[in-house]
Image: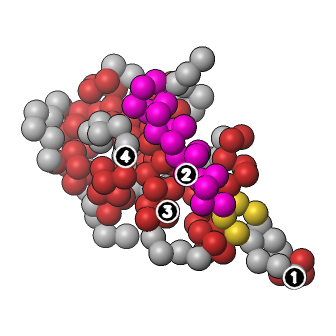
Amino acid sequence: MANGIWISLLTRQSPDGAPIGWDDLVVGHDFGLLGPDEIQDWARERPDPGPACQALAALEGPALLRFEEALWAACAEAGGKVPRPGGRRWARAQDRWRVALLRDAMASPLSAEALAVAVENIYEKVGCPEDMLGLWQHHSPWQGRQGGADRDAITRFLRRREDDLVNGPRG
C-alpha cells in the first residue's frame, strides 16, 4: 500500500478522536500493517521530535536492519516505555486498529460473504477477542453454503469497543 494509507485509515476511523501515537505505530508495525516508510514519514512530521525520533526518521539502507530497535527507542523516548503484548497500552492500540479496520469494512459496500472474509482477515491480522467470534461464520466449499457476516452483531461489537476506547473499559 502507498505510504500514509494505514495511518490515514486509523485517523479517519478511530472513534475516540485521539491522535495517532507511538503505541499505535508499534502495534501497527507488529501486526504488519505499517512498514518502515510509513512510520518514518509520520516521524518526520512530528513538530518537536526528540533525538530517537530523528534517528528513526533518518534510517536508510543497511541501517534499516535496526528499524525495530529505533522504533522502540523513539516510542520509549516519547512515552517512557514501549507497549508490550498483554499490557494496557498494547490492548488499547490493538483495539484502535481493530475498530478502525472493522468500521472501514462496514462502510464498504460488501456482500455478507465478502464482509465475512474481511472480518476473518481482520481477526487474523489483529487478533480476535472472545466477543468477536460471533461476527462471522466461515463455511468451507464442501459444506454447500456461503459464509456470512452478521452486520448487527458487528455494530454491537463496535459500539462496545468504541465506548471502551472513549470512556475506558468497564469493570
Q: Residue tagged by mark 2? A: 155
Eye-nearest disc, 4 or 3: 3
Disc 4 crowd rating (10 Å Cα; few below 14, some 14-19, many 20+) is: many
Q: Which mark is residue 14?
A: 4
Residue nearer the viewer, 123 or 114? 114
Residue at the spot of label 1: 144
Task: Determine if residue 95 is in view.
Answer: no
Q: What is the magenta range?
A: 150-168
Dominant secondary-structure state across the stretch colored magenta:
helix
State which quarter of the image contains the N terminus.
bottom left
What is the C-alpha distance between the residues marked 4 and 3? Answer: 14 Å
Give the mark toward the camera: 2 or 3: 2
Quadrant of the image for the C terminus?
top right
Q: Secondary structure at mark 4?
A: loop
The quarter of the displayed image where residue 125 is located: bottom right
4 and 1 marks in contact (CB < 8 Å): no
